[in-house]
Amino acid sequence: MKNPQWADDFRTFSLAQGGSSITQQTINLWLARNDETVFEKIDRKLLEVHLAARIERRHSKKAILANYFNRLDFGAGLQGIAAATKGYFEKEVKDLTLLEAATLVAIVRGPDMYSPVNHPDRTIARRNLVLRRLAEEGKLSMSDADTLCVKPMALALDAWRKKQVPDSITTMVSTELQMALPLDQLAKGSFRVELTLDSGWNHEISRNAEDHLHSIESRRAQTLKPLQTAIVVIDNKSGAVLAMLGGRESA
């Protein structure tokens, strides 16, 4: 009988193999820390094995898999299957095509190695491997798999990025959350933060401000320091912050 991966970890004392099942990998996403010592990793591995057995007795494989995909990093700043679906394809999960779903499964293997943004050829090759595996398992005809494999990978990542608030604002919100909530509650997550910011306004203000500052700088001495700006748009009735700009990334 082949040893499970965690047994190999203990035998080699490397702890490099990771969880031997989707359940253990799901638990790993909840428990793993970057600053663990070797002994803390051993304790976590033992806990993963214990928790995996309990979880599999109480929950279906479908529910465990859903939890796993909801926690995964899909690269490009997209955490979880819903964010990845929205970011890469501008869709809800229920509206994914088979080709798009296979693309996301390909990324799971390694968000950096199979990044559809930085390594599209690798992603397509991995996507096609997923499609052919589906055909081998009888979930898809081989002719349909062959037809899908020659199709390009259409992404909507640029459109999604234009709708996102700047990193400076998300950093500010993160700082505020750390001041307002206990760290253990932040670590558990399971809550949603909604901003009053209008991403469309924010994008337009940023673009127009940059163009205006460049036009002023073109008429000034080049030895002078770059100009800076700060803009806040507030709804007079509610007091909600609709747009915010502070500083220039290019400066």
Image: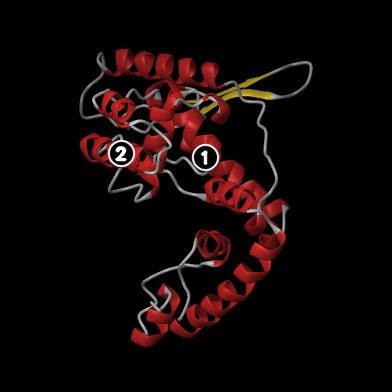
> Residue shown at 57%/46% (left/top)?
70
Q: Position of residue 123 (x, y in %)?
A: 28, 39
Quarter assignment of residue 207: top left
Q: Is residue 50 above or below residue 179?
A: below
Is residue 230 visible in the rendered image? The answer is: yes
Q: Position of residue 184 (x, y in %)?
A: 68, 63
Of the residues tagged 1 and 2, which is closer to the observer? 2
- Which of the numbered marks, if any, corresponds to residue 132? 2
What residue type is disc 1 on?
Ile
What residue type is disc 2 on?
Arg
Mark 2 neighbour density, 10 Å: few (under 14) some (14–19) many (20 or more): many
Earlier in the chain: of badge 1 and badge 2, it is: 1
Front in this rendered view, residue 142 or 147:
142
Q: Is residue 208 above or below residue 251?
A: above
> Residue shown at 55%/36% (left/top)?
82
Residue under label 1, please give it. Answer: 81
> Residue shown at 60%/48% (left/top)?
62
